[in-house]
Structures are given as C-alpha cells and as structure tokens.
C-alpha cells in the first residue's frame, strides 16, 4: 500500500507543480519574465533546498527525459520551419552552427581555465557544454512572446539554434570520452566519429521525414491519432539515429523540416495538437532540471561562474557570431542581435549531466557552473530579448494578424483542403484581384445564408469565403483577404519587393542584378521565360529561380503572365526592404557596387 500511496503523492505533486507554473506564468507575463525561468525556479523551490524538500539526484533519468523532450521540441520546430526560410541564410547559419560552436567553446574554455582553475581539456568540456544556443529557449521565447523579427534574422536564429545542438552534443561526448579514456580516441577515430554523426543523422532524418509524410498521406488517421503518429515517428527517428551512432538531434530536426514542407493533409490541425505536447515537454524538462539543482552547492562557484556567463554573453558569443556572419553581409545591428539571443537553456544543463553519468573528475563543478550560466542567460538575455529587438531595429511592428485562415482536411483527398477566410473591408479580393486558378470557390456564407459558388456573385465585406486549394499553396491566398496594411505585408512576402511588366527583357534584369542567365535566353521577355518553364498553364504564384532572385507570376492575362514579381534573397533583399529602389541612383550604385563586383 505504501508504494501505491507514494505513486498517488508523486502524481499529485507533479501536477501541482505544473499547475503552479501555469498560474505563475500569468503573473510573469505582466513583468516580461521568460516563462521557462518560472518553471526552472519552481523546480528549485520544490527541490532539496526549497520548501518542497524533494531530494532528486537521478542524472540518468534526467538524461533520458531530456532526450525525449528535446526530440519532440526539435521536431516541432522543424515542422514549423518553411523551406523558404533556408534561402539566403543556409550557408551562414550552418557556419555559425559548426565553426561558431567551436569558437565559442574554445574562448569560453580559456576563460573557465583561468577563473576556475580547471585543466585544459576539462575547461574545454565546460565550454562545449554551454556553447550551443538552446533551440527550446529560442523557439519558445520568440513565439510565445509574439515577437516578429525581420525574415533573415528570425530564420538565422531558429535554424542555427536547432542545427548547433548536434555539434555541441558531439563535442561534449567526445571530450568526455577522452577524459574517461585518453588512449581510446585518436585523430582518425575523431574524424570517423564526426563523419558518422553528421552523415547518418542527416540521411536518417531525411529518409525518416519522407517516410512519415508518406504514411501520413496513406493511413486514415483521425486528428488525435495523427498527431500521436507524428510524435512517435519523430521519437523513432531520434532513437534509430542514435542507435546507429548518428546525431539523433540533427536527424529529428531534419525529419521535422521534411515533413513540414511536404503535402501532409491536415498538418495545421496536427500542429495545434502538438502544441500541448511541446508545452508539456518544456515544462517537464525545466521542472526536473530545477529539482536536480542544489542551491547550497552553487555558492562556492557563484562568482567565477557568473564571470564565465558574462564573458559568454558579452565576448565569446558576439565574437563567434561576428566571425561567422560578417562575411555574408550581415549588418552590425543584425550581428549584435543574433549574438545577444545566444540563449542558454535546458541543453546546457542536459549536456552537463553527461560528465555526471560518466563520473568524471570535477563533474559536479561543471554541472553547477553550467546551471548558473543557464540561469544568468534566462534572467538577462531572456528578459531583455524584446528590448534588444527594438534597440537593434530587427523587430517588425507587432500587431495581431488580421487574416483568420481556417484550414480543414478533407478525408480521402490528398490534393485539396478546405480553407476559409472572412472578407475584410477594403480587401484586395473586393477590388481588381482575382482568385488563382488552383483555388476553387466552394461556398460563401453571407448574412447567415450559405451560397454555393455560382450563386454567390461578387464578394462583399463580412462574407466568409470557403475555397478548395492545394495544402502547400493556401498561404498564398492570405493577401487577397486581409485589410490593406496586412495585405501589403503578405503581398510583399509572396510576390517580393519589386514588380515588372512581363514585356521586360530577361537580359536587362539579369544585367542589373548580375543573375546567372544563359546568353541565348537574354533576348526573352519575362513572360516568355515563364512560358518556357511551365508547359501547362501558368498560375499566380508560380516561381522561377535565378540565383539569389526569384521571379513570381503576379498577374495573368488570358493564361499568360502579364506582371512579374521579383523577390530578392540575402543582403539584396535587406537593401530592397530598406527602400533602395533599383530605379534610384543610390539603389543602382549600391547594387552594382556590392553585387556586380
């Protein structure tokens, strides 16, 4: 009976902590406190030095729970990362996620060696433990806080925070293994392990993502079961990659990106269900990590650990970010903000449990320092992320999205889903804009009456319009139904910064933007260039890629492109968004000066 009552007490206590955390979060929001910090502090209060008095020192359970939670969090982050986000930022973010982690670990290790008196390898191990940006903290604080960043900065932060975890895990594991058995890990073994981790992780992640998406299309699963299938598939990919000695963290993130960018019916509804699971993983992970900490052991290392945290925030991370991003044309403000949002979170404490599991010398010291670094990062960087975004001018004006798109998966249909919009006053669809050919009007709800497509006539403000559209294209309809201000932003996201008549010569555009165009194609008009790429009828939103530029069919006339949008990636897009028109002398000079040479 004692074991049964203990189980009841354990369940009630765990639920009480979660409820207290949720309740405290409502108060924390009013003061701008990062919610993850609330759950971490609650865990500490419930721990051995707090009022709860719970003694918890199971590092093995912490490692397993942290692995499961991070797998779900990274998969969820991958699902929400659009393929377009990688354009223009893939090279710098991968450099930041690899070389940046190594630079940060080396610099932080050097300071830890000086402040804490650790040996060179032990100090480097501590640097590796706290070197990576925590994806869970970045995803959570950016999205939960409603902060809208400029496209390149937001994509850089989210992709880098997900991609650098495998590097930090690998570096930590290799250094810990070397400390445990110095003769077992030579240069050849290290190179082989690196290739195996990244190669197996990437391949299994891509293959697993394709398989999960294919099964989701074929299996007749309801909403709840479908979301559970996604999570189980992600955990399977995570476990399989780790079993085959690949990077499980890299594999599960890539699987999420692949699934999120494929034609998966009802994915939007599944994501809303997954939100609850991701929240639970976040809460459980930070509560357990708080329980694991013993504040009275932190006193002896508090001052040097804060010195390590200050160096990491103010010197180590900024230097690594500047070295990796400056060659790709990132501005000083962008570099400063990316450096400041080097949030440390659960991954750092999770990695610090590896030396504890391996019973390495000074393992407890490494764990305590990592805990203080994470706590300082959440307090200082997490609390000021919104202020920093406005200070460095990387935040977009915040407003609730006026477009209220509703998507409904249609059982038995893989090619179409039902999407509904309320028609806002002065929306583009009420003026000259027309629905693209791939969007079929299903019905209109007007004044409480359902009108079928043929009987609806012209749309009116206040209508609710329901359309059948391919799942991967529904977001392209947003600009048609939004109010003017919202529509301009959505229209720019879809069609790019500039527009040209289809009669403009491809050679003229290519010469101006230094685009890779074959000489024989320079005499074609933009409309003729589209016609060559699309044997079928061109639709609004169809795209043709030319190096850093994407041409988008913006308007049609008798099934032929009449107006073309031009979207510029990378630095060129930044200049365009700052108002340097290609027709202005300043815009011409900057473009030719920076990109033609």
Image (spheres, rainbow, N blue to C red):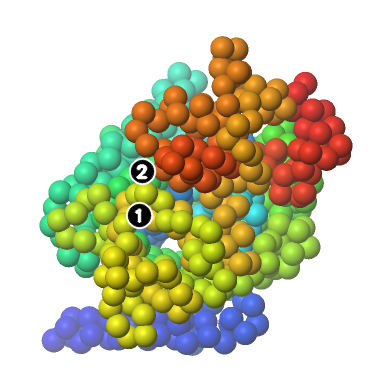
Q: Position of residue 264 (x, y in %)?
A: 28, 51
When the figure is inspected, residue 366 is found, relative to residue 192, above or below; the finding is below
Pick whichever, 398 or 273, lies toward us: 398
On the rendered structure, is 33 left or right of 230? right
Kindly state the secondary structure of the residue where label 1 is placed. Answer: loop
- What is the quadrant of the C terminus in the image? top right
For image coordinates 73% across by 36% down, the residue present is 329
**Mark in front: 1 vs 2:** 1
Residue highlighted by disc 2:
258
Q: Position of residue 94 (x, y in %)?
A: 55, 36
The 10 Å Cα crowd at callout 1, few under 14, some 14 to 19, many 20 or more, is some
Q: Residue furthest top?
A: 520
Q: Position of residue 422 (x, y in %)?
A: 43, 74
The 10 Å Cα crowd at callout 2, few under 14, some 14 to 19, many 20 or more, is many
Q: In the rendered image, is residue 8 in sight?
A: yes
Pick whichever, 457 or 21, lies toward us: 457
The numbered disc on residue 439 is: 1
Label 1 – label 2 distance at C-alpha = 25 Å
Pick whichever, 527 or 294, lies toward us: 527
């Amino acid at each position: 009976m004692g074991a049964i009552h203990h189980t009841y007490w354990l369940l009630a206590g765990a639920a009480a902590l979660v409820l207290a955390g949720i309740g405290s979060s409502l108060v924390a929001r009013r003061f701008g406190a990062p919610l993850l910090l609330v759950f971490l502090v609650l865990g500490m209060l419930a721990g051995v030095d707090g009022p709860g008095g719970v003694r918890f020192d199971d590092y093995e359970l912490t490692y397993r729970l942290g692995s499961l939670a991070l797998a779900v969090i990274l998969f969820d982050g991958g699902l929400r990362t659009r393929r377009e986000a990688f354009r223009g930022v893939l090279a710098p973010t991968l450099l930041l996620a690899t070389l940046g982690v190594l630079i940060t670990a080396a610099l932080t290790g050097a300071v830890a060696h000086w402040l804490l008196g650790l040996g060179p390898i032990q100090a480097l191990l501590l640097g590796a433990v706290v070197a990576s940006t925590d994806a869970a903290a970045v995803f959570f604080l950016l999205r939960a806080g409603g902060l809208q960043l400029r496209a390149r900065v937001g994509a850089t932060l989210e992709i880098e925070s997900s991609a650098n975890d495998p590097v930090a895990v690998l570096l930590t594991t290799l250094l810990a293994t070397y400390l445990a058995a110095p003769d077992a890990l030579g240069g050849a073994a290290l190179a082989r392990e690196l290739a195996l981790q990244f190669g197996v992780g990437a391949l299994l992640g891509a293959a697993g993502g394709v398989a999960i998406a294919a099964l989701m299309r074929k299996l007749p699963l309801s909403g709840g079961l479908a979301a559970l299938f996604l999570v189980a598939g992600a955990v399977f990919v995570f476990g399989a990659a780790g079993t085959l000695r690949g990077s499980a963290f890299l594999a599960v993130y890539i699987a999420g990106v692949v699934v999120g960018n494929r034609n998966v019916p009802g994915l939007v509804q599944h994501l809303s269900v997954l939100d609850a699971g991701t929240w639970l993983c976040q809460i459980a992970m930070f509560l357990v990590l708080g329980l694991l900490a013993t504040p009275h052991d932190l006193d002896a290392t508090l001052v040097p650990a804060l010195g390590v945290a200050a160096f990491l925030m103010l010197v180590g991370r900024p230097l690594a970010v500047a070295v990796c991003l400056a060659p790709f044309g990132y501005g000083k403000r962008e570099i400063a903000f990316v450096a400041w949002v080097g949030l440390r979170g659960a991954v750092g404490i999770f990695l610090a449990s590896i030396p504890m599991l391996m019973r390495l010398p000074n393992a407890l010291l490494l764990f305590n320092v990592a805990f203080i670094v994470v706590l300082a990062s959440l307090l200082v960087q997490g609390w000021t992320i919104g202020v920093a975004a406005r200070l460095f001018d990387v935040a977009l004006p915040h407003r609730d999205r006026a477009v209220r798109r509703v998507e409904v998966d249609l059982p038995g249909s893989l090619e179409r889903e039902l999407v509904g919009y309320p028609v806002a006053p002065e929306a583009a669809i009420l003026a000259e804009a027309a629905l693209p050919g791939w969007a079929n009007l299903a019905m209109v709800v007007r004044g409480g009456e359902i009108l079928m497509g043929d009987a609806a006539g012209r749309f009116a403000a206040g209508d609710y319009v329901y359309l059948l559209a391919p799942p991967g294209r529904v977001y392209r309809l947003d600009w048609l139904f939004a109010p003017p201000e919202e529509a301009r932003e959505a229209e720019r996201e879809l069609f790019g910064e500039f527009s040209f008549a289809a009669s403009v010569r491809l050679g003229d555009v290519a010469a101006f933007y230094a685009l890779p165009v074959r000489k024989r194609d320079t005499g074609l008009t933009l409309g003729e260039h589209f016609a060559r790429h699309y044997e079928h009828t061109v639709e609004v939103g169809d795209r043709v890629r030319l190096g850093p530029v994407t041409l988008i069919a913006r308007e049609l006339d008798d099934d032929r492109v009449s107006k073309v949008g031009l979207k510029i990636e990378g630095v060129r897009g930044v200049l365009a968004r700052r108002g340097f028109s290609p027709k202005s002398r300043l815009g011409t000079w900057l473009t030719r000066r920076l990109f033609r040479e």
